[in-house]
Image (cartoon, rainbow, N blue to C red):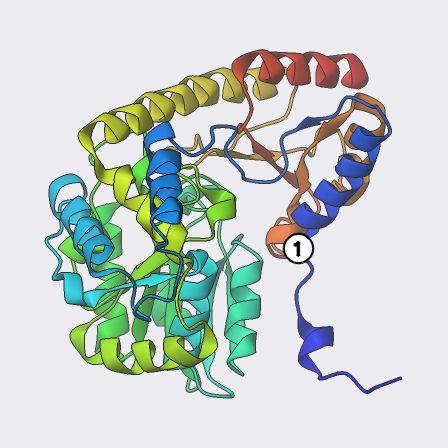
């Protein structure tokens, strides 16, 4: 057998995807499974987006585009930040990527050298560690608690920064917790990192799916952070594989250089479709869908707690509930398997998101309609007795 590179063994397993595979097998066998697992909205691309893509395809606009993306899409993204997220941005700093995954890969390749360390909270989105590893870096997971809303603090940065630390990767709102970092604390985090001449990669994938308070980009606090974002969640375009990054001016050329080799460009037809995301009628539709997610959150949190599944911090964004299952199990993987095969409900075990709370937590995604959520809670109640 051909010897594999060491990184194939070091890659962190994404249990949410493994769970999806298992649930799909049951579904194909004719078994009704309610998925609260993978973070994929049940809403699909807006009609105007589909129409725009179809028109571009018929017009033959399916060739390569510039590595940084269609100029008109970069301008539209910059305009969205100015009008909706409180941060005017020069379009030249926007780089369109193949999903947020493409943005993470390019950011890691641009900023991380072999042996560099990146600080991240525990819990966090598991593939982030793999992107750091792909550049030869290592991840230092910092345990967090409900007191800090499962987010890093400036004190955490100061305490855990070491000689090999190069920067931090944080998300607000976060996957898996759905919690945000308070703006005053975020400003203090930036100050601590800048004092150490480090970088901040800021995942804002769920920022537009914030439910409580003002939606405002971290760029309004610090213009030098590297912003990572996506059309997958708020814009409901998961399979279109389209995202973007906003970087300081001096990073544009080197990242564009790498993008031209590693990806050539993000899918061109998807970019033409995405232009329609920013039309007023389409944005109004996304806001209606955001309200639907908010209603689901307001149902599922008390529903879980009524089943003695504790929610330590109420999520204020995204579409996840990070819950404590200690009253029922101290083995999240076994509990996840039991829910799947006995209750026919798929939810992700806490071991996916880091060791600190791996045994006693689960992530429930409210990415299905309210009626299905109600049925899922009924099934859990029946199973749990």
Point 29% across, 38% down: residue: 277
Q: Position of residue 62 (x, y in %)?
A: 40, 57
Q: Position of residue 142 (x, y in %)?
A: 50, 62
Q: Position of residue 154 (x, y in %)?
A: 31, 61
On the rendered image, what quadrant is the N terminus found in? Answer: bottom right
Q: Position of residue 280 (x, y in %)?
A: 18, 30
Examine the rendering and report whether any part of residue 248 can be seen: yes
Examine the rendering and report whether any part of residue 227 can be seen: no
Point 79% across, 29% down: residue: 27
Q: Look at mark 1 in the image and give the residue it sits on.
A: 14
Q: Nearer the viewer, residue 159 or 241?
A: 241
Q: Nearer the viewer, residue 80 or 221?
A: 80
Picture quarter containing residue 164? bottom left
Say left or right for 303 vs 53.
Answer: right
Q: Is residue 180 above or below residue 329?
A: below
Point 44% across, 30% down: residue: 314
Please tell me how crowded label 1 is: few (under 14), some (14-19), or many (20+) other residues with Cα within 10 Å. some
């Amino acid at each position: 057998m051909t010897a594999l590179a060491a990184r194939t063994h070091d890659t962190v397993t994404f249990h949410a995807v493994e769970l999806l595979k298992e649930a799909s097998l049951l579904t194909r066998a004719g078994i009704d499974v309610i998925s609260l697992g993978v973070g994929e909205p049940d809403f699909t691309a807006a009609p105007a987006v589909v129409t725009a893509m179809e028109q571009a395809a018929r017009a033959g606009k399916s060739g390569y585009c510039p590595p940084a993306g269609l100029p008109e899409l970069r301008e539209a993204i910059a305009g969205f930040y100015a009008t909706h997220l409180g941060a005017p941005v020069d379009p030249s700093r926007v780089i369109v990527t193949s999903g947020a995954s493409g943005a993470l890969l390019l950011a890691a390749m641009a900023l991380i050298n072999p042996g560099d360390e990146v600080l991240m909270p525990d819990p966090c989105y598991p593939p982030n560690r793999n992107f750091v590893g792909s550049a030869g870096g290592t991840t230092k997971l910092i345990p967090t608690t409900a007191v800090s809303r499962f987010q890093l603090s400036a004190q955490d940065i100061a305490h855990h920064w070491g000689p090999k630390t190069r920067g931090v990767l944080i998300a607000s709102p976060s996957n898996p917790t759905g919690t945000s970092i308070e703006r005053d604390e975020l400003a203090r985090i930036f100050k601590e990192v800048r004092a150490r001449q480090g970088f901040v990669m800021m995942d804002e994938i769920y920022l537009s799916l914030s439910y409580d308070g003002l939606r405002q980009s971290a760029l309004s606090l610090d213009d030098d952070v590297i912003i990572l974002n996506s059309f997958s969640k708020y814009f409901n375009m998961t399979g279109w594989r389209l995202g973007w990054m906003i970087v300081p001016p001096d990073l544009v050329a080197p990242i564009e250089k790498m993008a031209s080799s590693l990806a050539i460009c993000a899918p061109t037809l998807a970019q033409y479709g995405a232009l329609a995301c920013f039309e007023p009628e389409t944005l109004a539709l996304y806001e209606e869908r955001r309200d639907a997610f908010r209603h689901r959150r307001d149902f599922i949190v008390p529903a879980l707690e009524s089943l003695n599944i504790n929610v330590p911090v109420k999520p204020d964004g995204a579409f996840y509930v990070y819950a404590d299952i200690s009253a029922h199990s101290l083995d999240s993987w076994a509990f996840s398997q039991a829910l799947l095969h006995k209750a026919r409900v798929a939810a992700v075990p806490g071991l996916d998101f880091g060791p600190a709370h791996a045994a006693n937590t689960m992530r429930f995604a409210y990415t299905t309609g309210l009626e299905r959520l109600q049925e899922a809670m009924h099934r859990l109640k029946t199973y749990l007795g």
